[in-house]
């Protein structure tokens, strides 16, 4: 756990590290929203077909 905290601390000190952290968070947020949209569309499509 201490090792991860040390990595995060080093990344937040660096300007490019902040971009990496924010970019990674944004990437996975958008990816999750896309998958959520796909599941909703497929779920509604299956629900309306019966």
Image (tube, grey):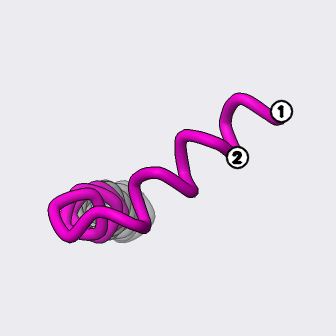
Is 5 on the left or on the right of 33, as rendered? right
Magenta stretch: give its range: 1-25
Report helix, strand or loop for mark 2: helix
Report helix, strand or loop for mark 1: loop
Residue that carries the numbered disc 2 in the rendered image: 5
Residue 13 is situated, as x and y percent measured from the top left of the image, at: 40, 67
Q: Residue at x 54, y 40 (%)?
A: 7
Task: Say which of 32 and 42 sits in front.
Answer: 32
Q: Residues within 10 Å of mark 2 (few under 14, many from 20)?
A: few
Q: Quadrant of residue 34?
A: bottom left
Magenta span: chief secondary structure: helix
Residue that carries the numbered disc 1 in the rendered image: 1
Cα–Cα gap, marks 2 and 1 = 6 Å
Residue 45 is situated, as x and y percent measured from the top left of the image, at: 28, 63
The numbered dot on residue 40 is none
Residue 5 is situated, as x and y percent measured from the top left of the image, at: 70, 46
Q: Residue at x 71, y 29 (%)?
A: 3
Whether the residues at callouts 2 and 1 have beta carbons within 8 Å, the answer is yes
Q: Is residue 6 above or below residue 38?
A: above
Task: Say which of 11 and 35 sits in front.
Answer: 11
Q: Is residue 20 above or below residue 7?
A: below
């Amino acid at each position: 756990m201490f090792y991860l905290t040390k990595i995060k601390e080093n990344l937040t000190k660096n300007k490019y590290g902040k971009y990496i952290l924010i970019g990674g968070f944004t990437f996975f947020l958008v990816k999750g929203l896309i998958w959520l949209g796909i599941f909703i569309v497929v779920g509604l499509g299956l629900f309306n077909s019966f």
